[in-house]
Amino acid sequence: MKAAVYYETGGPEVLRYEDVPDPECFPGAVVIDVAAISIEGGDTLNRAGGEMATTPHVVGYQCAGTIVEVGEGVEDRHVGQQVVATMLWGSHAERAATFAGVTWPVPDGADLTKVACVPVAFGTAHDCLFEFGHLVGDQTVLIQAGAGGVGVAAIQLAARAGATVFATASSPERLDRLMPLGMDRGFDYSHEGWVDEVREATGGQGVDLVVDSVGGRILSGSVQCLKYRGRCVTVGNAGRDAQPFDVSLLGAGNHSLTGVFLGAEVFTPRAHQMIGGLIDDVAAGRLEVLVDRTFPLAEAAAAHAYVESRQAVGRVVLVP
């Protein structure tokens, strides 16, 4: 099969399009004929400097397609079934193997390109808002990096819950794309003064919850946007800013900071059911996936470069 691989970590240019052996179907697993690959933030981070479990390494932890092989012990999946899947690595290929327990059936008639983008981004957003962020409908939430995959999902989910939704992005043009999703007000966090603008928009009180997928210096600003006893959820480090967080910032306002990693929850019945419901919502049009661009798998290097250019609103998808 063909796959996008690399032999060393680095910039997008390390990706090569090569023939590699088909994945083996181990016990408890399925093999998927891949139709669409959602490029996740962790994919670009791994390629840039993460651990390589194989050489050459096939990166990627989310895709959708059709099951072509079922492993020993798997009873609730079958050949020919369309699924969305997550995995530790291997999605950037024509075929991928993963545990059946981290696959979800695709509803009839669903757009595979869109549902391929759901589990990680929408599942993470849901956990950040509700399971760990404890958001309720009469509260105000600030979604950092609103134009990213988690941001697009979180804006919709928070608006659907009845919250007042603020979001940030790196330009007014990107913010304009978020208004139809349920954003009440947007802030350009590429310039100084955005924290003051958020606080002014709340009458000086601050927001109840911040979902921060950027980290670094932005995380410090997120905490400064909180009201008394406000909560901040940090998930990932999309900004790749290594600035350490000063925990003393939490004390004066009795603020809380919670880290979220969906991967630690994804095998639980709660999370699996939650993600399945989100896939159903996207398939039925109750939630929207924004696919900014699609690239052929052979152009994975260009796709990764486009993701890292921070021009996209929503997801970038590879198609084998």
Image: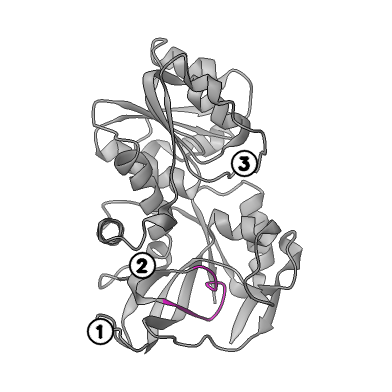
Amino acid on which the number 3 mark rests in the picture: Gly
In magenta, the rendered stretch is 88-98
Residue on which the image places disc 3: 239
Q: Is residue 19 left or right of residue 262?
A: right
Q: Residue at x 71, y 61 (%)?
A: 12
Q: Nearer the viewer, mark 2 or mark 1?
A: 1
Residue on which the image places disc 1: 75
In which quadrant of the rendered image does the N terminus lie?
bottom right
Query: Distance of mark 1 from mark 3, alpha carbons?
Result: 42 Å
In which quadrant of the rendered image does the C terminus lie?
bottom right
In magenta stretch: residue 93: yes
Amino acid on which the number 1 mark rests in the picture: Glu
226 and 314: which is toward the camera: 226
- The numbered mark, 2 or 1, whose residue comes first in the sequence reads 1
Answer with the quarter of the image where residue 57 lies: bottom right
Q: Residue at x 42, y 10 (%)?
A: 204
Q: Identify the secondary structure beneath mark 3.
A: loop
Q: Identify the secondary structure beneath mark 1.
A: loop
Query: Distance of mark 2 from mark 1, alpha carbons?
Result: 25 Å
Considering only vertical position in the picture, is 136 above or below 156?
above
Q: Identify the secondary structure beneath mark 2.
A: loop
- The numbered mark, 1 or 3, whose residue comes first in the sequence reads 1
Q: Is residue 31 left or right of residue 46?
A: left
